[in-house]
Image (tube, rainbow, N blue to C red):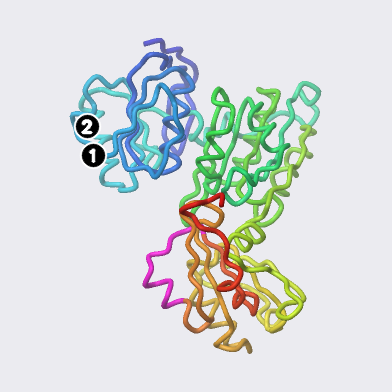
């Protein structure tokens, strides 16, 4: 093992000695099935490690250094391992892996519990010394690389723009979100540094401010940095916040729009967002809960000739439907929830404002989803064309 000692840094309240670990030709284990676990495995592979992924992933990009074993973790998996990433969905399972690794003196990183980890993965650790930009706005600005804020679309890789494809294949570093699909990640430069910055309810890998400064730090290290975001980065993607920081630091950047979930998911669900007979306008809103409430101007959403598209509306679905009915929408207004739109796993549940919450509760729906409300949803039975079992008819 080659260990280059550096300086002490504080990460999540714990002191770590900065170091560089050589993983080439080392046996590493990743336990877990999430997108994050898969990308941790692929990143280790990109540095020459021999990686075994133990879990039940839906799909994994082909990689010569990666062996996937679709089963649960066992203690025997640690035999011969040099480094382990505990990325299971169950925190108890991760704690068990951490304890076993500590007993066997094996380096172990757990994204769910970094304070108990014996090692911090560079791509996932919110190292304030590395990610907090301390340089003056003009320092090294002329030598900084280009940051491209790229929309990855709703999931189908064939919906990427040509420019987006070119940039992800040439990127030196890619900071990507939870909603970027695995087939799209498989198209990225396999030698790039992959940094997961996904967000889900009550679980943010990196705070937004850390992501903003991370992009600045990476631009001073690499020539081509891609911030890859699901959908379109300027539609509920916080893209404006991220490039504001780049602009303040005089880091060159560009924005590559992507197909937003509203248009992509609606098209694949057979629901036109506007129609002369049903909707002359369309409004995009976010259903994100804050302090248990959804702060929307409900009175502006009561027009029956308007389509309402709600991003991030699954958790607050009951509240959204009840509030719209309370403020004047007819209970029989057509409504649909699209899960994993444009992807082979796409499901569409359609009903009414009154009936949709119960239908969703009966069908074990998980994010990502998009909620569409309005008369245009009634056209779905006639216009639905996408068959996930035969994606390209």
Residue 336 shows up from this direction: yes
* Residue at left offset 45%, top offset 39%: 12
Residue 371: quarter of image = bottom right
- Let me know if residue 117 appears in the view: no
Quadrant location of residue 366? bottom left
The local secondary structure at tag 2 comes to helix
**Which quadrant: the N terminus?**
top left
- Residue that appears at 24% across and 40% down: 72
* Callout 1: SS: helix
Which region shows up in magenta?
Answer: 357-368
Residue 64 colored in magenta in the image:
no
In this orientation, which residue lies closer to the viewer: 308 or 375?
Answer: 375
* Circles 2 and 1 in contact, beta carbons < 8 Å: yes
Q: Position of residue 101 (x, y in %)?
A: 25, 29
Q: Is residue 151 left or right of residue 39?
A: right
Residue 133's spot in the image, x, y percent? 66, 33
> Left or right: 337 with respect to 379?
left
Total numbered labels: 2
Question: Is 367 within the magenta?
Answer: yes
Give the number of the disc on residue 334: none
Q: CA distance from mark 2 to mark 1?
A: 6 Å
Looking at the image, which residue is at 42% across and 22% down? 64
Residue 270 at what x, y percent from top left? 60, 66
Q: Is residue 4 above or below residue 257?
A: above
The numbered disc on residue 100 is 2
Q: Relative to residue 92, is residue 350 drawn left or right?
A: right
Observer-nearest of 295 and 274: 274
Vertical side of 9 occupied by 91: above or below: below
Q: Which residue is mark 1?
A: 96
Q: Residues within 10 Å of mark 2 (few under 14, many from 20)?
A: some
């Amino acid at each position: 093992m080659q260990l280059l000692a550096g300086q002490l840094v504080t990460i999540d309240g714990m002191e770590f000695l900065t170091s560089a670990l050589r993983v080439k030709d080392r046996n590493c284990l990743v336990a877990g099935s999430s997108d994050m676990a898969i990308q941790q495995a692929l990143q280790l592979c990109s540095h020459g490690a021999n990686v075994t992924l133990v879990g039940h992933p839906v799909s994994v990009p082909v990689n010569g250094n990666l062996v996937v074993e679709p089963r649960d973790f066992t203690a025997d998996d640690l035999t011969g391992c040099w480094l382990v990433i505990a990325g299971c969905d169950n925190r108890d399972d991760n704690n068990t892996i951490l304890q076993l690794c500590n007993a066997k003196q094996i380096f172990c990183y757990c994204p769910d519990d970094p304070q108990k980890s014996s090692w911090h993965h560079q791509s996932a650790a919110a190292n304030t010394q590395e990610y907090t930009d301390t340089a003056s706005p003009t320092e090294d600005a002329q030598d900084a690389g280009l940051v491209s804020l790229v929309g990855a679309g709703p999931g189908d890789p064939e919906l990427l723009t040509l420019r987006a494809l070119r940039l992800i294949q040439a990127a030196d570093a890619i900071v990507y979100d939870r909603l970027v699909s695995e087939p799209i990640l498989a198209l990225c430069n396999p030698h790039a540094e992959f940094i997961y910055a996904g967000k889900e309810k009550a679980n943010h890998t990196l705070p937004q401010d850390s992501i903003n400064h991370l992009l600045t730090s990476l631009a001073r290290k690499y020539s081509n940095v891609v911030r890859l975001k699901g959908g379109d980065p300027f539609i509920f993607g916080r893209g404006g916040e991220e490039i504001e920081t780049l602009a303040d630091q005089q880091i060159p950047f560009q924005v590559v729009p992507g197909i937003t979930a509203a248009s992509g998911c609606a098209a694949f669900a057979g629901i036109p967002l506007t129609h002369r007979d049903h909707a002359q306008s369309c409004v995009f809103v976010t259903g994100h809960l804050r302090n248990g409430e959804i702060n929307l101007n409900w009175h502006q959403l009561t027009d029956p000739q308007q389509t309402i598209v709600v991003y991030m509306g699954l958790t607050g679905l009951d509240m959204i439907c009840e509030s719209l009915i309370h403020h004047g929408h007819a209970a029989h207004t057509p409504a649909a929830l699209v899960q994993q739109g444009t992807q082979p796993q796409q499901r569409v549940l359609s009903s009414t404002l009154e009936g949709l919450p119960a239908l969703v509760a009966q069908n074990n729906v998980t994010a990502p989803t998009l909620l569409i409300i309005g008369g245009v949803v009634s056209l779905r039975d006639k216009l639905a064309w996408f068959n996930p079992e035969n994606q390209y008819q």
